[in-house]
Image (cartoon, coloured by chain):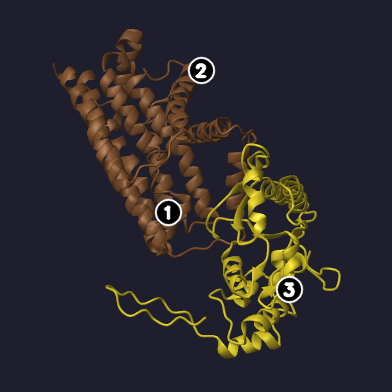
Amino acid sequence: MPDSDQFPVKIEQPAQGGNIFSRVFDELTAFCRSRSLFILHYCTGCGAIELPPAMTSRFDMERLGISPMVSPRQADILLITGYVSVKTLKRVMLTYEQMGSPKYVIGICSCTVNGGMYWQSYATAKKLNDYMPVDLYIAGCMPRPEAVIAGLRQLMDKIAAGKANGWQDYYERYDHYLGNQQRLFGETWQTPTDVIAEARHYGLFGPETLGEHTKLLQQHQKPLEALEMRLGLGAPEKVKP
Amino acid sequence: MHWLELLVELTLMPLVAFAIGLLMVLMMRRIAARLQRRIGPPFLQPLYDIVKLFSKRTQTSHGLLHEFGIVMAVGGYVAAETLLPVPGMNGIAEKGGMITLLYLTMIPSLGLALGVGQCANPNGSIGISRALTAMLAYDIPFVVVIAGVAMHFGTTNLVDVVAQQQAGGIEAWGVTQMPLLALAGLFALQGMLGKQPFEIYVAPAEIATGPMVEMGGKFLGGLFVMQCFQLYTASVLYVTLFLGGGENWITFLAKSFAVLLIPMSLAFLFPRYRTEDMLTMLWKWPMLLGLLGLVFVGS
């Protein structure tokens, strides 16, 4: 859960009164969103081993409308199974920002909650919800498929009730999340996604969207340019770590 | 025909096709589940998916052609539905015929190629080049099949083809008159539906679903709608050519779903062929069967 108790989080309210059709329509979309979830797995940790049984014949996630997808554009849920090191967290952030809203993040295993057995590691990101809003944690080392499916059902209930709004929190408190990312990745960290412009687009621009960290980002930010198209095998360009 | 009646038919035919297509997608997913000893998705799952995809807040567009490509992909099939006679409704089938229909079923692949090209994703480009190669692979035997059927019935008019088959009973059906062509058509059908073993252009684990890799939200929703139409068009076309069309809606639906049962039951038992192997296979066996069938039709 994002720290919604400490910070005011605007929740997408279904249209009140007035047009009955828009209210029915909102409820219909919320219901369909909860009954059709495409999962993108980020499987670097050991929790990934519990997902094949959850998908295949014994537990069969498809009967709940949950199916695996392979690209961030198509997915609704980002499922992070197990620890994320500083290096993999960069990739997780890139993936998360490319996904289409409304999007949900699930952290599976103790490692995403508090670092788990990697608590003393210098290279592991301890709390996942410092860097991105996590809608649901499924604790355990590792959680059994029953626990995974119980967790997914909880998420479905939250979505149907319109309470799974972690993705809005990322726009509203972008400065907070960006600060934590900069703490790990350095001051020059930037992603191809213009989160601030997206926050304006969705009408989720809050007082905490901008701050000292986004100011730092705007100092370093380089505009995105298309990759140069080149034929043949030249010397590979040096990639910054 | 009165113009108002025609307008109603032209509106109803794609809508009915979409509703039946949703059921066909459901059947496909249920069959896959049963073969893998799972329960499978609930009854309205295809509809939930489509409504959800169209109601996503983020709609990442890569440009005008990306959007236009999806419209072309769905629109090609919507146009094709008005040329396919169903019980009680002929639409503009009498003015179209098989050859127009064959052209229209190629438009969705070309539209998809336009849209994917604009996305500039290498996985998508690989996928669509494979998809177009696959189209070349299954369309050539399919053209032979269409030519054979047209020669046998002496017309390319689908309404006449259905009328001739229904007048003669089961003995006059395409499948009893031209069994070799019907078999070749079944081969081509498997390729046309893009089901295993001919689904190398999707290949989720290898090129991240190929053409669909950059599609999210309404774009993927459009492709889901297209899939409904695709299943409907392929099976109804086969029923029209070989199984005597539909005398009424009950036999029509029974035949269409039965035709789809064959490729779908085969699909989930096989891995996939490489593109060049698919080309070799489809240009060898269905072509051979089709040409042999043509000889019998001609003599």
Which colour represents chain A?
yellow
Q: For mark 3, does the 10 Å Cα neighbourhood hold few (<14), some (14 to 19), or many (20 or more) residues?
A: some
- Which amino acid type is shown beneath numbered disc 3? Asp
Q: Which residue is mark 2?
A: B250
Residue A162, image x and y in percent?
Answer: 76, 55
Mark 2, secondary structure of its residue: helix
Q: Residues within 10 Å of mark 1 (few under 14, many from 20)?
A: many
Residue at the spot of label 3: A130
Label disc, if present, on residue B210 of the rendered structure: 1
x and y percent of residue B45 in the render? 62, 39
Q: Name the mark nearer the viewer: 2 or 3.
A: 3
Residue A22 vertical position relative to residue A177 in the rendered view, above or below: above
Which corner quadrant holds the N terminus of chain B? top left
Q: Are marks 1 and 2 in contact (CB under 8 Å)?
A: no
B261 left or right of B281 in image: right
Is residue B59 depicted above or below B279 in this figure? below
Mark 2 residue crowding within 10 angstroms, few (<14) / some (14–19) / many (20+): few
Q: Which residue type carries mark 2? A: Ile
The answer, for residue B47, to whether it is visible in the render is: yes
Chain bearing tag 1 is: B
The reply to whether label 1 and label 3 mark residues of one chain is no
**Rendering coords of residue A146 (x, y %):** 75, 45
Instruction: Give the spatial CA distance, label 1 vs label 3.
Output: 34 Å
Tell me, by letter, which chain the rendering colours brown: B
